[in-house]
Image (cartoon, helix red, strand yellow):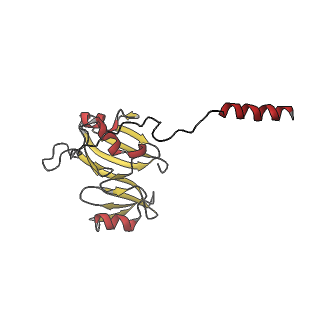
Amino acid sequence: MLNMMILVLGLLSASAGYTPATADSVPQPSVKLAQSPPSFLGLLPDDREAIYPMGQFYSMGDVALYDDRDSVVGKKGPPLSVTKDAYTGYTEYRYEDITVGLYEGMVYYVHADVDMNASASPGKIKLNGKWLFLESGGLALALGQPDFEAEDGDVYIRDLAAIKIYRDPETRTIVGVDLFDTIAF
């Protein structure tokens, strides 16, 4: 009982003279006004947040991980071809710019072939709705350093999703990019 009284007295004395803070009395963080974003990412360090809000990769080529088959067709239209791998069970929908890997009707990976020498759209992908140049400077600004470096490319992991930048083993030029669920592979 004595312990309880000491506790109550301690709480009362600690709050004596205390007034709750109001919005006027608390220093407010300065607000940084957004400038109009550049048309391509990898140009400014602040654009890193635009690529993966909350530290995540969620879409490539306008297709999000875990979209269903109907969402993919709604976004991209009918595929140029559809193939099913009997061994893995994955069905691939091929489009002009990407290949979408579905399993049981859900997107588990998105792949883009890259031609760094193409004149039409050399070395860029649409990641999280923003265009990203795939040159080393743009990648470093937008994605930071790779989490893993392998013979065939670099891997960037954000939560349960990852981006793999495939490189030619001899020339180290970028030849493809995958967005995939790290749990599925």
Nearest to the observer: residue 78 or residue 4: 4
Against 110, residue 48 (above or below) is above
Residue at the spot x=39%, y=46% of the render? 53
Instruction: Specify the farthest residue to the right.
Output: 1
Q: Position of residue 40 (x, y in %)?
A: 22, 45
Q: Toward which corner of the image does residue 89 lie, by quadrant?
A: bottom left
16 sits left or right of 181 in the view: right
Instruction: Specify the farthest residue to the front.
Output: 17
Q: Toward which corner of the image does residue 169 lie, by quadrant?
A: top left
Nearest to the observer: residue 59 or residue 173: 59
Against 38, residue 145 (above or below) is above
Q: How many marks?
A: 0
Q: Toward which corner of the image does residue 79 lie, by quadrant?
A: bottom left
Which quarter shows the N terminus? top right
Q: Position of residue 182 (x, y in %)?
A: 46, 46
Residue at the spot x=25%, y=33% of the render? 137
Residue at the spot x=26%, y=39% of the render? 42
Q: Position of residue 138 (x, y in %)?
A: 25, 37
39 sits left or right of 141 in the view: left
Nearest to the observer: residue 5 or residue 104: 5
